[in-house]
Each structure stands twice: as structure tokens, then as C-alpha cells.
Amino acid sequence: MKCPRILKVKAIDDHTLIIKFTNQEVKQYNILHLLDNPVFAPLRQPAFFKNFKVEQSGYGIVWNEDIDLSEYELWKNGMTTADGDRSVTL
């Protein structure tokens, strides 16, 4: 299955992202389940967590050279927003 790419991402709290994809669908992704993995430990710091960039072609988001999440992970494991609102402002 080909996943849509990422258009925009916004951190809405210290562990949740809202992602808008190229098909205009909006999903919510919570990182808490990743924090047991030592690689993702820096994401426990709110300032670090909120300092990410969307890769130029939309294939993922990146915090640094060691920490990133692919569009596939965000699409497959993201939850559709409660109201399914495609017009969420990011």
C-alpha cells in the first residue's frame, strides 16, 4: 500500500502530533509508546519534541540525525481525528 505523504505537522501538546497528509486526511499520532526505546528518549523533553521538521518531500518528520518517523508509521499508526475534520488548521 502506498501511503500519502506529509503536508504539515503540528505538535498539540508534549507528546501528540497532528499530521495533514497529501490526500487531505488528518491524523493524530501519540509518541508515548516510543519513549521506552532509548533512541527516542530525547522526545521526553517538550522543547526537543516540538523542534522537528517535515522532510522536504514529505516522506517523514525529523528531529535530528538519529530520530525520525516515516510517513508510513504516522499514516499506519496515526488515529483519525475524532471529528474527522479535514479543515484542521496546521
Image (cartoon, rainbow, N blue to C red):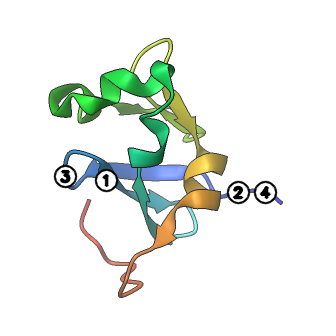
Amino acid type at mark 3: Asp
At 27% across and 31% down in the image, what residue appears?
A: 44
Q: On screen, 21 above or below 56?
A: below
Please name the residue that numbered disc 1 is placed on: 16
Can you name the residue that lies furthest to the top here? 65
**The N terminus sits in image quarter:** bottom right
At 40% across and 78% down in the image, what residue appears?
A: 86
Of 6 and 52, nearer the camera is 52
The Cα atoms of the two marked residues, 2 and 1, are separated by: 20 Å
Secondary structure beneath label 1? strand
Of mark 2 and mark 1, the one earlier in the sequence is 2
Query: Label 3 crowding class (10 Å Cα cut-off): few <14, some 14-19, many 20+?
Result: few
Check if mark 2's residue and mark 4's residue have beta carbons within 8 Å: yes
**Label for residue 3?**
2
Q: In front: mark 3 or mark 4? A: 3
Amino acid type at mark 2: Cys
Check if mark 3's residue and mark 1's residue have beta carbons within 8 Å: yes
The Cα atoms of the two marked residues, 3 and 1, are separated by: 6 Å
Please name the residue that numbered disc 3 is placed on: 13
Can you name the residue that lies furthest to the right here? 1
The Cα atoms of the two marked residues, 3 and 2, are separated by: 25 Å
At 34% across and 53% down in the image, what residue appears?
A: 17
At 46% across and 33% down in the image, what residue appears?
A: 36
Residue 82 locus on image (x, y percent): 37, 83
Secondary structure beneath label 3? loop
